[in-house]
Image (tube, rainbow, N blue to C red):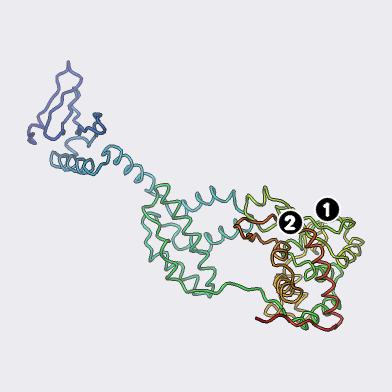
Amino acid sequence: MLTDAQCRNATCPPDKRRVRVTDSGGLYLEVSPAGSKRWFQKLYVGGKEKRMALGSYPTVTLTAARKARDAAKLKKADGLDPVHARMLDRLKQAMSEGETFEHVAREWYGKKSALWSVHHKTRELRNLEKDLFPWIGKRRIAAIEPVELLQTLRRVEARGSLDVAHRVLTTARGVFAYALATGKAGRNVAMDLKGALTPHKGRHFAALTDPVKVGELIRAIRGYKGGLVVRAALQLAPMLFQRPTELRAAEWSEFNLDAALWTIQAKRMKRTYDGKANGDPHLVPLPAQAVTILRDLHHITGDGVLLFPGEKGRSIPISDNTLRAALLTLGYGPDVQTVHGFRATARTLLDEVLEFDPLVIEAQLAHAVKDANGRAYNRTTYLKQRADMMQRWADYLDKLAAGADVIQMKRA
């Protein structure tokens, strides 16, 4: 057993590369001819001899070196490689020092956002820059406690944005998961906070489903006195019931009016990144009424790219707000009927009144439902059935608008 005096007085002759002064349990002090002294621990891991540096003497005292030796032995007894374990500890410490939440979040965003849609990129960045960075952005991510993140989310709730608070939590959960995986944080403090947030109801787009009221709405649309371009979009929205973005940004190159078919490229659909890049286009059969509207519209905007160019330029489509405002002028506010709600209107009446197969309806809505065997159906199937359905739907809207006898909806 070494004494502190022996450690202080230990020397190495000039003709030797080093001298080892042993203590016990594999601990020894290595002395160089220049006088430097370093502690090492000799270990056997997996039948192979290793040595672990414990620091320089006298910065690391004899007592401290023995404590480090004993700690290494405990790790070895637990089946760990002390050398490897300490290397990981140092790596984690080096990675976490000075890593603020904002720095890690931007790194996470940079690596993940390449696979996101433009809308998702915008929303995630807004969650970070508006609701997270101002409060915890400068905090070292490894030191953030769950209560700090919860307080940040409470600020979002305080302004009445309950659904946004849940989305911000999802964003934070992704950042902390990345920090945990890369050694920048020791835990994901966002994992257990969902139960602490105020529950919120999912948003539903207002939609009329009473046939009589739908007929009144169709008559109001056909009597719209605004611009011809907006009027055409309003007429097609309930007839084709595609997503508002898909309709507003439609291009003439997507339409074959002779074949009565609208082909929406996958990149414009609401799909995953892979679905947008590699998926099949969505086919929309056009009823005769839609073809007539489109041929008339072609005389107005057919020399450009877009069906519905806005006032800001022919390369920019009309906005969501344009159609929303048009409905409002007709007396249909967002609590009564929305443009997106035309999808729910069609889904309900096609099923409960016209009694079409739900799978055919879902195919027309471009919903990725699954068949009885759990396989996602091909979005381009049921084309013949959908063509028949779309024509019957357009005819049905004509009857409702004319005030014809209304078929009663099925009741459970």
Q: How many marks?
A: 2
Q: Earlier in the sequence, mark 1 or mark 2?
A: 1
Vertically, is 350 above or below 262? below
Tag 2 residue? 381
* Residue at horizontal 36 percent and vertical 52 percent from the top: 186
The one of 82 and 127 positioned closer to us in this rendering: 82
Which residue reaches farthest top?
Answer: 15
At which x and y percent is residue 225?
86, 76
* Residue at horizontal 14 percent and vertical 19 percent from the top: 13
Vertically, is 264 above or below 365? above
The one of 149 and 204 positioned closer to us in this rendering: 204
Q: Which mark is residue 368?
A: none
At which x and y percent is residue 357?
72, 67
286 left or right of 409?
Answer: right
* Residue at horizontal 72 percent and vertical 66 percent from the top: 361
Q: Marks 1/2: CA distance?
A: 22 Å
Front label number (1 vs 2): 2
Vertically, is 154 above or below 43? below
Residue type at the position of mark 1: Ser
At which x and y percent is residue 121?
59, 56
Residue type at the position of mark 2: Thr
Tag 1 residue? 253
User: Can you tell which quarter of the image residue 385 is in?
Assistant: bottom right
- Label 1 crowd (10 A; few <14 / some 14-19 / many >=20): some
278 left or right of 85?
Answer: right
At which x and y percent is residue 150?
42, 67
- Label 2 crowd (10 A; few <14 / some 14-19 / many >=20): some
Which residue reaches farthest front?
Answer: 373
205 left or right of 219?
Answer: left
* Residue at horizontal 18 percent and vertical 18 percent from the top: 16
